[in-house]
Image: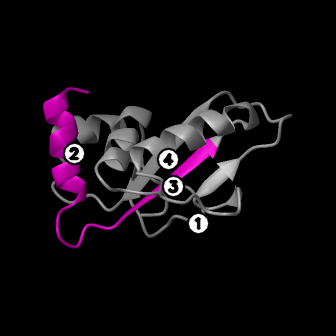
Amino acid sequence: MTARQLDQAYDYFTKPNMQVYIEAESAHSSRLRFEVNYALLTNNQPLPPNTDERPYFVLQPTADKWGIELRIYFIADNLPDFLDEISTSNTRPGYEEFDRRINNNELINYLFSRGFTLGG
């Protein structure tokens, strides 16, 4: 994403009445890397204490998962084209209040650097 698109995404996700939910899912081997990066980006915001429930999942060492996956859930309203292109309809059980989802680490890390945190 371009710097301009990242700024536009931030503006979109901070519109009044916008509801977003951010979660992280990490391979066990990537946990420390995520936690250090999250602390740097969020000015040491604490992580949720439980790593086996929303919004922070650290998978067991035997799980078939590589790296870190960040997801943002939201209700789309006049979604900019570039966000529409990278979003998908949200059909995940337990997240029914949101109609769209984006899995994009670059975008979500940028949002973390601008004040967003896990769960919010």
Residue annotated with mark 3: 91
- Magenta stretch: includes residue 3: yes
Q: Which residue is mark 1?
A: 94
Q: Amino acid at mark 1?
A: Gly
Q: Secondary structure at mark 1?
A: loop
- As measured in the structure, the alpha-carbon distance from the residue carrying label 4 to the one carrying label 2 is 22 Å
- Which of the marked residues, 1 or 4, is nearer the chain's N terminus? 4
Magenta span includes 68: no
Q: Nearer the viewer, residue 12 or 77?
A: 12
Q: Earlier in the sequence, mark 4 or mark 3?
A: 4
Say what amino acid the circle numbered 3 marks.
Answer: Thr
Residue 66's image quarter?
Answer: top right
Q: Residues within 10 Å of mark 2 (few under 14, many from 20)?
A: many
Amino acid tagged 2? Ala
| Residue 56 in the image: above or below residue 120 | above
Q: Nearer the viewer, mark 3 or mark 1?
A: 1
The dot on residue 9 is 2
User: In the rendered structure, are the residues bearing label 4 and label 2 in contact, judged by CB atoms less than 8 Å apart?
Assistant: no
Q: Does residue 102 appear in this view? A: no
Question: Amino acid under label 4?
Answer: Ala
Compared to residue 19, the image places residue 64 above or below, namely above
Q: Dot 4, crowdedness within 10 Å: few (<14), some or many (≥20)?
A: some
Judged from the image, the secondary structure of the residue bearing numbered disc 3 is: loop
Region in magenta: 1-25
**For the residues carrying marks 1 and 2, which lies nearer the camera in this image?**
2
- Kindly identify the residue that appears in the image at 22 percent across and 37 percent down: 6
Q: In this picture, is 12 found above or below 93? A: above
User: Which comes before the other along the chain, label 3 or label 2?
Assistant: 2
Q: Earlier in the sequence, mark 1 or mark 2?
A: 2
Q: Dot 4 corresponds to which residue?
A: 39
Tag 1–tag 4 contact (CB < 8 Å): no
Pick whichever, 97 or 63, lies toward us.
63
